[in-house]
Amino acid sequence: MRQASEHNHDLIVQRYTLPNGIPPKAYLTTLTQMRCETVVTVGPRLADAVASKTLHGRFVVVTDHNLTAPHATSLTPANATSAAIAATIRDPSS
């Protein structure tokens, strides 16, 4: 993510880790309430929460699992280069 921010100097990158015992959906809801404009997640654990229709916000999900959610863009790990993540954040239709 820090490499992605080097491609786009308007990005402010902070890394958070899902704490043990916290439901993924509740955690992602908290991040969006903190006004994180775009949340990038890695792995299936958070991807399932992103797929929830009641979750608000914009997400980029790096996972091998098929994800269909109108508010999310999915990238496979092989395609999730720093440039691809930065481009997706700048233009969600990319």
Image (cartoon, rainbow, N blue to C red):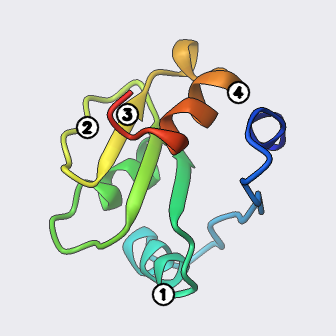
Q: Earlier in the sequence, mark 3 or mark 1?
A: 1
Q: Position of residue 2 (x, y in %)?
A: 83, 43
**Mark 3 is on which residue type?**
Ser
Q: At numbered mark 4, what does the secondary structure look like: helix, strand or loop?
A: helix
Residue at 32% in and 29% down: 65
Q: Earlier in the sequence, mark 1 or mark 4?
A: 1
Residue identifier under label 3:
74
Q: Earlier in the sequence, mark 4 or mark 3?
A: 3
Q: Is residue 87 above or below residue 73?
A: above
Q: Position of residue 14 (x, y in %)?
A: 77, 63
Q: Nearer the viewer, mark 4 or mark 3?
A: 4
Residue identifier under label 4:
82
Q: How far is mark 2 from mark 1, CA to CA?
A: 23 Å
Binning the other alpha carbons within 10 Å of mark 2 as few (below 14), some (14 to 19) or many (20 upward) gives: some
Binning the other alpha carbons within 10 Å of mark 3 as few (below 14), some (14 to 19) or many (20 upward) gives: many
Cβ atoms at labels 2 and 3 below 8 Å apart: yes
Depth check: 51 or 92 in front? Answer: 92
Residue identifier under label 1:
33
Q: Nearer the viewer, mark 2 or mark 1?
A: 1
Residue at 19% in and 40% down: 68
Q: Is residue 48 visible?
A: yes
Q: Is residue 39 above or below residue 57?
A: above
Q: How far is mark 4 from mark 3, CA to CA?
A: 14 Å
Q: Earlier in the sequence, mark 2 or mark 1?
A: 1
Residue identifier under label 2:
67
Cβ atoms at labels 3 and 1 below 8 Å apart: no
Q: Position of residue 64 (x, y in %)?
A: 40, 24
